[in-house]
Structure formats: structure tokens, C-alpha cells
Image (cartoon, rainbow, N blue to C red):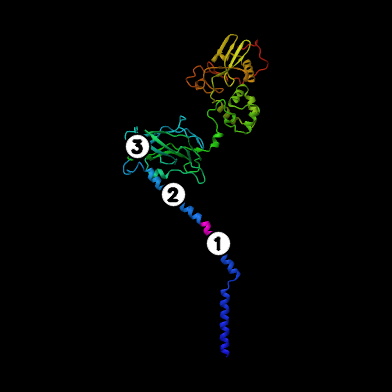
Amino acid sequence: MTGKRILDDSEQYWQNQRRQRAKPSLASAIGEVVKINFIQNFCTVLEPMLRRVVKEEVEIGLRRTLSFSNSNALRFKSLEPSTMQLKFRKRLTLPIFTGTKILDEDGNPLEIYLVDIRNNQESTFSGTIKLQIVVLDGDFPSADNNIWTSDEFDKHIVKERRGKRPLLAGEVSVTMKDGVVFLGDTELTDNSSWIRSRKFRIAARVVQATSHELVVREAMTEAFVVKDHRGELYKKHHPPMLEDEVWRLEKIGKDGAFHKKLAAKDIKTVQDFLRLSVVNEPKLRMILGIGMSDKMWEATITHARTCVLDNKLHVLRGPNHAIFFNSICQVSKAAINGETLTGRDLSRLNRAYTQKFAEAAYQSWNSLEVVDGPFINDTPLLTQGDLVDQQPSNCDNLGVVGSVYFYSSVEPYNFSESSSQGELSATYKFID
């Protein structure tokens, strides 16, 4: 009887254990729900990622296949050498900035033409050829190798940086007719500083033609640096023009201290700067202040004196005189008491009185009569102390007297080292 009771108790115990295991606890139920939600959320996030990766890989594969097919449309005779080559007619206009139209050295659209390699003559091919314009690494091809395969060419094509616009914008696909084509508005959208060579090349390759028996090599320009467009906004002009803003001169930064000091005195252009430097150089130096050292001044004035002058003469008239000044207030000709002085004869003028003429002309510049004179653009401004034999041979009548300088016919006479007191009068002795 006792043994049977023990057996019954044992069975009861295991039955209770099975019942407890069959009833899930609240914690385990919550855990199961959390696991299920996690798996569902993970799959929801993972699915679009997998789809995108698969899509990108498929697209890359298709592009490679199509690129290989297109780039070899005219090269299916792969064992035969090229008989034709694309070439750019002229070199590029440099420097090149982002967002600006790419032009040739004459400022015209780029021209691509077809050359027959066998005789190095321009081809007379009369069909149509579709070209693709691409950007190449500036290091390709190497200096000692002007022969490349289409695969090597394709490997050195530069694509845009991740997250950037297409590197080449505008007309990047053109159709060549009768062996010649011009590129329209084509521009680069990024600088070249991020690749190892720091340079790009513009290149053209064939993607389709009316004749599939041609074997055409690609064209490419010289290697060049591409700078950000904002660099162009602040660059100096060499040589400067009269109407250029004064900050285009060396050592004068846009919106910098020197620029603001000059603007406060109404010196806004290179012409304004040069006029005051001729009439009263010490005053100009005083405006710039001690912040401009002698070395900086020399760089600025030397750059300014390379300015290209126009042929305008400004006339200061009086009862018995007419003094002709060029566009930077240098005397080019003087008619006094019926006598006309030009060239070397200008040295006969009394420098003190002539300085007064220059000062008067400077003060009333905008009201002076303006007439046309001979062009002197081919002759750079002569700096003080320059010698005659240092000048080009086509300036035979150039003369120098002390620290003063002038040119023939409309050659300017400089007053920057002269000064005098008193007012202008028709009774002054103008000629020594």
C-alpha cells in the first residue's frame, strides 16, 4: 500500500511539471513577440537595400556591356590597327574654371576633325559619326607612349565624385558630318584638385557610325588644371585694362584694406590709380598708408604700368595754350603761343608749370575735351629711369630726360617728381 502511494505521488509531480511547461509565462510570451517584430522590421529595412544593391550591380553590368559594345562599334576588326584618328584642331584657352565654357586658344568653340593616319592628311570621309565627349585623367597617356588601346582609354575616363553633378556638362554627345564637328556649350562642373595628377583632359571617342568598317582612335586635348569659378572672380589681370577695378592690381585685394582706402578717395579703376600716380605719386602712397611696403608698392606700380592704353587724348585749353594728355594724365602734345611740341621737344617745357597743367587737368578730368589720337598700345609704359637702349627697336623716337619720360607724337611727359607753388597764368614762361 505504501509503495503504490509513492508511485502515485511521483506521477502527480511529473504531470504538474508538464502542465507548467505547457503554460507559457508572460515574460516568454513578450519575448516571442519582440523577436517576431524584430525579424519583421529587419526584413522590411533589408529588402530595399538588397533591391538597390542588386539594381546597381545590374545597371553597372549593363553599362559595361553597352559601353564595350558602343566604344567598339567602329573597332570590331580588333586585330587591325587604326586607320583614322580624331583630333582637336587647336589648343585650349587657359586657365579653365568650373562653370565656364571650354573654348580653343582663339576663343572659339572646340573643333574636332578626322585624320587619315596613313598619310597624316585630313580625312575626306563623307559619312556621319556619333561622338561622345568625356574627361580623362591628365596623366594618360604617359609621356613616352602615344599609342593606347580602347580598353586603356576607357579605364582612364574620370567620373564625377560621389554626390556631385556629372563632371562634364552641356553638349557631351555630338554628330560629326563629313569629318568635322564643333562642340557647343561644354563645361566642367568640378575642379581637378581631387585626382592624383591634378589635371584633366577633354577627349572624344566614337560610339556609332554609318560605316562599321572604320577603326578610329580617340582624340584628346593637352592636360590642364581646372580651378573653382570663385578663383576667377578674384584673379588679377595681366595686363590690366584701364577700366578694370583697382583690386585687379597686384597686392590690392578685393574688399581689402588698400581697396577700401582707395575707394574712399574715389580711386576705383586702374586708370584712376595710374592718373594719380603720374600727377602726385606721394599722395597716392599716403592714401595707401604705411601698410604698403616699398616692395609691395613696387609690385603694384610695376603691374599697373603694364596697362594697355587707349588712343584717347584729353585736352586742357587756355587763352594761349592747348595741352594734350593721354588717358593717365601724361602730356602727349602741347600747343603754346602757336608752337606745337611733341616727342623730345616736350623736354623744353618748364617742368614746374607743366606740373600745374597736369594738376589742373586732373582736377577737371571729366570736363576735358576728348579727341582721338594715334594708338600706342604696342608700347608699354616707360618707368622712371629707363634707358633708351632698353626699349624695343620700333620705338626709335623714344626719349628720356632725367627721371622724366615721354613718347613720340603722343608720348607722355611725367610729372610725378615735380611740384611748384602758384596759379596758372597765360603770362607764365612755359618754355625754358
Q: Under tag 2, what secondary structure?
A: helix
Q: Position of residue 386 (x, y in %)?
A: 54, 22
Q: Can you identify the residue that label 3 sits on?
A: 84
Mark 1 — residue?
A: 38
Residue stretch rendered in magenta on the structure: 36-46
Q: What amino acid type is highlighted by mark number 2?
A: Ile
Residue 75's tag is none
Instruction: Specify the farthest residue to the top.
Output: 338
Three-letter amino acid code of the residue under disc 3: Met
User: What residue does disc 2 label?
Assistant: 60
Asked which quadrant contains residue 304, the reply is top right
Q: As rendered, which of 151 and 68 lies closer to the eye?
A: 68
Location of residue 87 in the rendering, given as x and y in whole percent from the top left corner: 39, 35
**Quick one: label 1, few (<14), some, or many (20+) residues within 10 Å?**
few
For marks 1 and 3, the one nearer the N-term is: 1
Q: Quadrant of the C terminus?
A: top right
Q: Is residue 20 visible?
A: yes
Tell which of 361 and 19 is nearer to you: 19
User: 98 or 2: which is nearer to us?
Assistant: 2
